Image (spheres, rainbow, N blue to C red):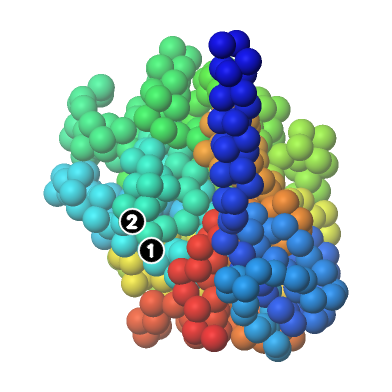
Amino acid sequence: MKRTLLASSLALVATFTFAEEKVQLPQTLFQNVDIFNGTENKLYEDHFVLVEGNIITSISKKDIDVRDDAVVIDGTGKTLTPGFIENHAHLMLMGPSLPTMESNTTWEDFAIHGTRMAEMYLMQGFTTVRDAGGANGGLRRAIDAGQIVGPRYYPSGAFLSTRGGHADFANYTAPVGEETNFSRLNMAQEVDSVAEVKKYARNNFRMGATQLKYMQSGGVVSAFDPWQLLAGSPEEVGAAVEVADTYGSYVMAHSYRKEAIIGALNAGVKSIEHGFMFDCEISELMEEKGAYITTNLTAFDPNLLEIPAVKNVASSLAKAKSASAAFKDYIPNMKKCPAPRGFQTDCVGSVDACNIQIAYEKKLNNDFFGPYESLKTLTSVGGEIAMLSGDFMNPYPDAKLGVIEKGAYADILLLDGNPFEDFSVVGTGDQWFGADKRPESPESIQLIMKDGVIYKNTL
């Protein structure tokens, strides 16, 4: 009897083993492509890249053997790059103004806008987006479940800010402590003590955040805060870092002034957002702390003062003029003392307007820093920033992002040309305000693959 049971068990194990061996992952072979791997200032010409399932499993100068059922894509004359990574977006914030969103916008409006923004980003070549405030975990769950189309998604939950700070979106006459539209939906929370920082920081992780966003400086078009503001005490910023540490994650800080940036870094913040008063001292401190910076280069566009939200509001126009004067050394300082910099657009507005702004931000990156630094900013640096969310909060922990290498996630673009010679193939736009509506996806981005799935292929 025992022998019979043992034989049956062995037969069952063999059956399962045989069944497992028969399971074969889908194969996609890219042949004759020129590879930008995300890290090196060169292209690897006429190479072959094999994707199995959602992972890059082989890269070779020689042809790679595949099964008869493999999808084979001839990329002759095309550049294969990692999928682009946006490090500072606000997919839920449609505008046209903060007061409108506070007083006249429902959760349905926000959700529909976020859904459309997610698809737009993917079709612009962004296979990963880090949301810098205003979105919880629901959009990511819908994307990852295949209910809607979009990129890999790293939300920050509610903006955290003091009363009168850059995330105080309450109506002008709102009493202190009154619930707002943004606070009800956990899109922005007022935190005015160490205890409140900890409470709402923990709630953000509970609601699906992968990292925290603290508003340390003021802004230009916001109502109550001078851009020079130092919001939150060192203890309060440190409290956000303490909570993030317990989740194995990190804090990103909206920081303009040099004092704000240095204070954030010394408190343990790992990602400086905007960082317009960046200089060589900050660069050295960032290297010491292992920190990153993301900067929206549209802030240095000469047409900045023509933005309606700036031009038509006297206080905002005055703030913009003083900010532009104070921020003038950012680009020369970044060239002199470079720091790890991720791509950032920071658009709040309609899908069509953000599509235009993204393409213009791509152009400005190349104008200011050239193709290699721009490509690295769009790819491998963003992948490193994504990994800061750690082992527990990173929703995509099994492979690297932002690189073309064996074992990395199969997030891949095919560009119709060489971006080192013609950067426009990444999908740039030559105009910001007054530009015509852009197409759903740039013609020059001929293939978009995310997680091993092809979402666009015009070859």
Relative to residue 146, is residue 415 drawn left or right?
A: right
**Residue sitting farthest toward the left:** 104
User: Residue 39 falls in which quadrant of the image?
Assistant: bottom right
Relative to residue 50, is residue 220 drawn left or right?
A: left
How packed mark 2 is, by other alpha carbons closer than 10 Å (few <14, some 14-19, many 20 or more), is: some
Residue 189 visible in the picture:
yes
Relative to residue 91, is residue 341 drawn left or right?
A: right
**Residue at position x 40%, y 25% in the image:** 206
Residue 330 visible in the picture:
no
Q: Which residue is mark 2?
A: 148
**Residue at position x 81%, y 40% in the image:** 287
Q: Position of residue 226 (x, y in %)?
A: 45, 43
Kind of element beneath mark 2: loop
Q: Is residue 365 above or below residue 417?
A: above
Task: Name the mark nearer the viewer: 1 or 2.
Answer: 2
How packed mark 1 is, by other alpha carbons closer than 10 Å (few <14, some 14-19, many 20 or more), is: some
Q: Which residue is mark 1?
A: 119
Q: Position of residue 390 (x, y in %)?
A: 63, 32
Q: For the residue marked with disc 1, what is the amino acid?
A: Glu
Q: Are marks 1 and 2 in contact (CB under 8 Å)?
A: yes
Q: Position of residue 86 (x, y in %)?
A: 54, 57
Q: For the residue marked with disc 2, what is the amino acid?
A: Ile
Q: Position of residue 13 (x, y in %)?
A: 60, 30
